Image (cartoon, rainbow, N blue to C red):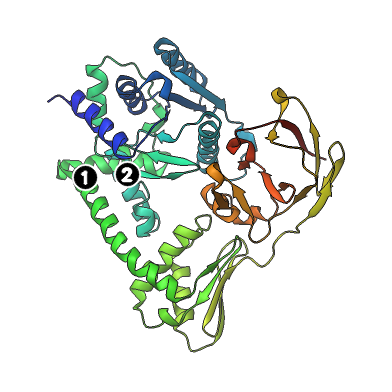
Amino acid sequence: MTAEIDLISQVRHVLQQNKAKKILVAVSGGVDSMALSDIVDQIWSKRAWGIVNVDHDLRPTSAKETEFVQQFCHNRDIQFFTTKWNHNQANVGVEAAAREFRYDYFQQIMRENGFDTLLTAHHANDLSENILMKLVRSGNVYEITSLKSQREFGHGQIVRPLLTASKKDLHDYAQQRSLNYVQDESNFEDITMRNRLRSDILPKLQTENGQLLRHFGLFDQQMNALLSIAADKFDRLESEMKLQETDSTISGQIGSLQEIPANQQSLFWGRLFTKKMPHLSISNKQIRQIIAVIKSEKPNSEVDLENGWRFRRSYLDFEITQPDELASFDLAIKPGQEYSLGKRRFKIFETTQENADIAVTKRPDSMRIRTRKPGDRLLLDHQKHQKLSKRFINEKVPAKKRAQIPILLFDNQVVWVEKIYNISDYLIKKQIFYKIDFNEV
């Protein structure tokens, strides 16, 4: 059986296993994503998949790479979506900011066009690099196993069908299929840890054992299996601790933890922060401090985390919180009038369907614009509901920003949450249309 047939069968199996229906493939133009696109084009209906590309504008060749991907889509009659990043607005590390922008755009395209599955072309070499990089940076087992073959993503899922295929497999496939692709020369520059691992460390390790990539894959599978066993125990432990969550606080009781060995506590807290507070970067030192506070005979202690967040113990209770939350607001509003919300101006007015930002079945008797409140719920398909707090987590909205995000209500029903929710996406009958203007002062 050829590598070509193997890869096609593998991708088809993974897509069927994860019940993918309408697929969006993230494509940079490199050999990995071009090979994946070619495979999907052979096994999936043209009407049920598309390609998305982001021009990060970080290299002189980036615009040409986007043009290359666009031409590929034109030649094969594939849906194509693209945008360009204005990186001058980045206020964090460029790599992290670029990734955040990229995945936010992917979610937007999926939401607006009904895609349920995002495919990325991560492969076995990427998995191995990720494990090595996370070992070097933190050793947190939940970070080491973060590159999963499938996970939830917005309203859908991310699927990585090539994690068992090597970079060489994809090069061989591209050669057999006579595929063109672009070469990112920056991948060979020793300017990032990932590039140094890719170009120097990993090849040297592979000379020691040609089965290295397979062993990394096996390690990842076994580690995930062990973590799933630990998850059963930790889920029970969270229940015993009477864990409670809001958008800005996690609290509970520490009695059940005090008899657990420190190494298991370390695993517990690593899981809790990774799962429930992924926006926080918690060091091993801070986890050791938390464990020391729990085991201490002092009834009241606290540990500084980051960005104002703190772990506080009071007798047998604990709380992880950010004390200095930003001011909230709650205003009754009327269409056509302008309102001041801090440094921004808000206005809503009726418009035509073509210009609408939101559509509803009837004209509301009352409108409000406010910040979140406990118990806020969002209407979904088939009269189902979702907690706003869950949507914030799914959309990876930083906890410190959640208190300021404006929420629009019609007749006390949440109809719009800036950037992450629009009731129009879930209504079949739409008769009244509104335009929202929300601008800096």
Q: Residue furthest top?
A: 75
Residue lying furthest left: 1
For disc 1, the neighbor class at 10 Å (few under 14, some 14 to 19, many from 20) is: few
Above or below for 66 versus 90? above
Figure check: 152 above or below 276:
above
Residue sitting farthest toward the bottom: 297
Whichever of callouts 2 and 1 sits on the residue coming sooner in the sequence is 2
Residue 132 appears in the figure: yes
x%, y% of residue 51?
44, 24
Residue at mark 1: 205
Residue visible at 77% across and 28% down in the picture: 351
Q: Is residue 246 left or right of residue 285?
A: right
Q: Which of the two residues, 122 or 243, is positioned nearer the viewer here?
A: 243
Q: Quadrant of residue 299?
A: bottom right
Question: Based on the displayed image, in which of its 4 quarters is residue 4 positioned?
Answer: top left
The answer to whether one can see residue 93 in this image is: no
What is the total number of numbered labels drawn onto the structure image? 2
Q: Amino acid at mark 2?
A: Glu
Q: In the figure, is residue 257 to the left or right of 15?
A: right
Disc ID at residue 230: none
The residue pinned by badge 2 equals: 129
Q: 381 or 141, which lies in front?
A: 381
Amino acid type of the residue that numbered disc 1 sits on in the rendered structure: Leu
Task: Please provide percent x and percent y for residue 100.
Answer: 53, 41
Helix, strand or loop status at disc 2: helix
Label 1, secondary structure: give it: helix
